[in-house]
Structures are given as C-alpha cells and as structure tokens.
Amino acid sequence: MRLDLNTLPIIGNFMDTTLSDLQPRQSALVKGFKQISPPLLRLQEQGVVAGTRIQFIRRAPLGDPYEIRVLNLLLTLREHEAASILVKVES
C-alpha cells in the first residue's frame, strides 16, 4: 500500500521559514542556516547570525537580488542565499 502524503492532515508547521519566504518590510529573527557556503560565511561576518533581527526590504523587479537590513546595514543577496537562511517571523 502506498502512502499519499497529499491526503494526510497537516498538524503543526513542518516547513522551516526562510528569508526568501518573507514579504517586503517584514522582520524576523535569524535561527540559523540550512547549509554553509562562502557567501553565507561572508554574511555571518557582516552580522547575519542566530538571534539577530533582520528585515526584508525588497526584491529586485525581476526577483533577484534581495535587499535586507541587518544591524543598520543594507545588504543584498541572491535568492538561493536567502533560501538558506532560517528565520522566525516576528509577530
């Protein structure tokens, strides 16, 4: 018997929220990273570390890059980099 995942009830939140899921002007706290790469290490050196408040400012008209605010710095990053940053949305 095959299990169809589309028919199972959803209980809780099984998906991690990433920076790329945020809407413009939305803020969140950094929880960590899905993977580490040289561009993400550079972002960590610039203050994108667990517990830091981050604000998603805007996307470029064609969707990439993203502009974020961290510690009063405006930074830009690629969509795949934003998708690697795990966040907790502030209410």
Image: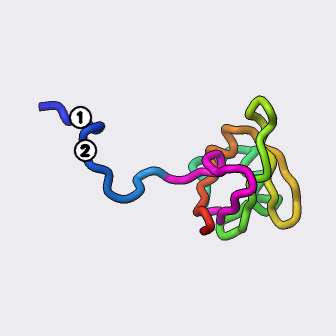
Q: Residues within 10 Å of mark 2 (few under 14, many from 20)?
A: few
Say left or right for 11 vs 32.
left
Question: Toward the viewer: 66 or 40?
Answer: 66
Quadrant location, the N terminus: top left
Question: Toward the viewer: 52 or 4?
Answer: 4
Residue under numbered circle 1: 4
Q: Report x, y in % for residue 17.
A: 55, 53
Q: Is residue 52 part of the magenta span, yes or no?
A: no
Q: Which residue type carries mark 1?
A: Asp
Quadrant location, the C terminus: bottom right
Helix, strand or loop under label 2 = loop
Instruction: State the extent of the magenta-drawn residues as a range.
Output: 16-30
Q: Report x, y in % for residue 79.
A: 70, 38
Q: Is residue 90 above or below residue 38?
A: below
Q: Is residue 29 part of the magenta span, yes or no?
A: yes
Number of the label disc, if any, that sits on residue 81: none
Residue under numbered circle 2: 8
Q: Are marks 2 and 1 in contact (CB under 8 Å)?
A: yes
Q: How is the image coloured?
A: rainbow
Q: Measuring 66% from the left and 70% from the top, which residue is drawn there?
A: 51
